[in-house]
Amino acid sequence: MAKKFSIANYVLVSILVAIGLFLSFATFKLPFYVNDYAGFAGAISLSYDVGSGQTAVFDVAPISSDATITQEDLDSTVDFVRDVLYSFGGQYNQVGIQNNTEIRVQTVESDTSSDLMEAIGTRTEIIIRGEATEEETKYDIHSDVIKRCLGTYQATSASSTSTSYSYGVYIEFNSLGKDQYKTLTDYVASNGNTVYFYTVDGEQLGSFSGITKQVTTGATFLPLSSVTTQSSANMNAVNILMGSLDVELTLKDNGVTTAYLGYNSILYVGISLLVAFVLLSIIMVIRYRDLGLISILTGLVNIVLYLFLLQALPIVTLSLSGIIGAVMGYCLTVLCHIVLFEKMKKEYSMGRKISLSFKLAYKDSLFTILDIMAIALIGSLALYFVGFDLLKSFAIGIFIGGLLSIFSVYCVTRLFTKWYLPLNSTKETHLAFKREASNED
């Protein structure tokens, strides 16, 4: 009965792995849906060395005619634009100064990257008021105290029967703005219950009602009735963020750059990885027999999970260095299996039964594997936080690989070996196990 259960489990897992591999690489049309299914691999965000990039050049000018642009202004603007791109356009971007008065930006090509570049070049300076008037008031809050903006979709009013929602911009203030907004909402709570948003030119952008007491969170919401998509809300958020700058950016040039390496490089890398996987699998089977087959099945599970995480995590933008990092991450799984299987062989050679050898090997190899993973994870974190852009993708690949290696060995492989014991708990040749000569005597 136990053998049938183990066989059934292996068959079920094999089917699920086959489905996972199909979903990872296949592309097909989805019924009743506009977009095609691209597979996990096809949905991974690519950097501009293996995909393509969006390039833009901005002129930097002072807001007032009597001011001048200093190097400090340019440096702070570069940092600001880099943070905006990180928030709205992914993590793999390059921002720098050229010709002393221009900022050059290169980011990954996407459906919204062109709109994002235009939004960065559009400055919307706002004033938040407690009254519906274009005239200056005592409690006005200006853009320079805005710390962060995000496009969002949230409730604007509620009743006992329904709740109204709207796209808009979530605005977070710095410490000064937080104090100003406390004062404003304290006034508004007893004078109309509504906050109004104006541009410096006097145009009313929107209003937010229902304020009945002082707001201490340091944030507010600007509903935009004309906005109907999340992407448009994001672009409005960028416009308002740029309005908090002390300089004005004007889009001078905007275009698409071709990939440095091209899409063919992905195909060649894929073929190389497939050959490497096959060779490693052959070596593992020759060296460890049935355990090698188990490691192959675990490896396929690892690959499916790896591809899923690469396309699901928003911080991942895969460059050539990221592909190398992913390969090294998978190699960590192979290395952990080798450490584990060698420990199993050693335990069996000392006279233990196969089942006990498995159990002791998992226990005794834990600290060795954790040491390997700790070095990999700490190293990848160091590369991510202190390394330059090209190393970030490499670091992410190793970090994900390290976490998956621990999961694969101590969850997936352990489960597979547990299922294996009812099928073979005595035949050492199927595992390439061998007793020491002294024990055999």
Image: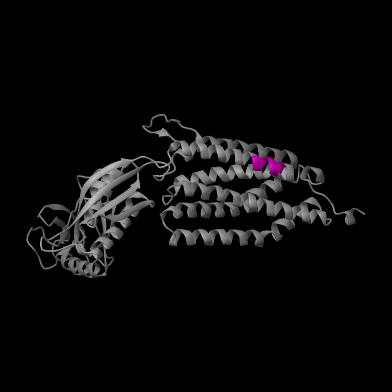
Give the x, y percent position of residue 247. Answer: 19, 59
Residue sitting farthest toward the right:
441
Q: Residue at x 64, y 54 (%)?
A: 410
Magenta-drawn stretch, dominant element (helix, strand or loop): helix
Total labels drawn: 0
Quadrant that contains the C terminus: bottom right
Q: Relative to 332, does residue 280 appear above or below in the rendering?
A: above
Q: Describe residue 324's horizontal placement relative to residue 90 as left or right.
A: right
Q: Residue at x 43, y 53 (%)?
A: 390
Q: Relative to 403, does residue 295 appear above or below in the rendering?
A: above
Q: Residue at x 46, y 52 (%)?
A: 393
Q: How is the protein colored in the picture?
A: one colour
Is residue 1 among the parts visible in the rendering? Answer: no
Residue sitting nearer the eye, 353 or 397: 397
Residue sitting nearer the eye, 208 or 230: 230
Q: Is residue 408 magenta?
A: no
Q: Which residues are magenta?
A: 279-285
Is residue 174 among the parts visible in the rendering? Answer: yes
Quadrant that contains the N terminus: top right
Residue sitting nearer the eye, 186 or 404: 404
Q: Describe residue 306's horizontal placement relative to residue 14 as left or right.
A: left
Give the x, y percent position of residue 325. Answer: 52, 50
Give the x, y percent position of residue 253. Answer: 23, 45
Q: Residue at x 66, y 61 (%)?
A: 368
Give the x, y percent position of residue 27. Answer: 46, 32
Q: Describe residue 324's horizontal placement relative to residue 234 as left or right.
A: right
- Specify the quadrant of the image occupied by residue 112: top left
Residue sitting farthest toward the left:
135
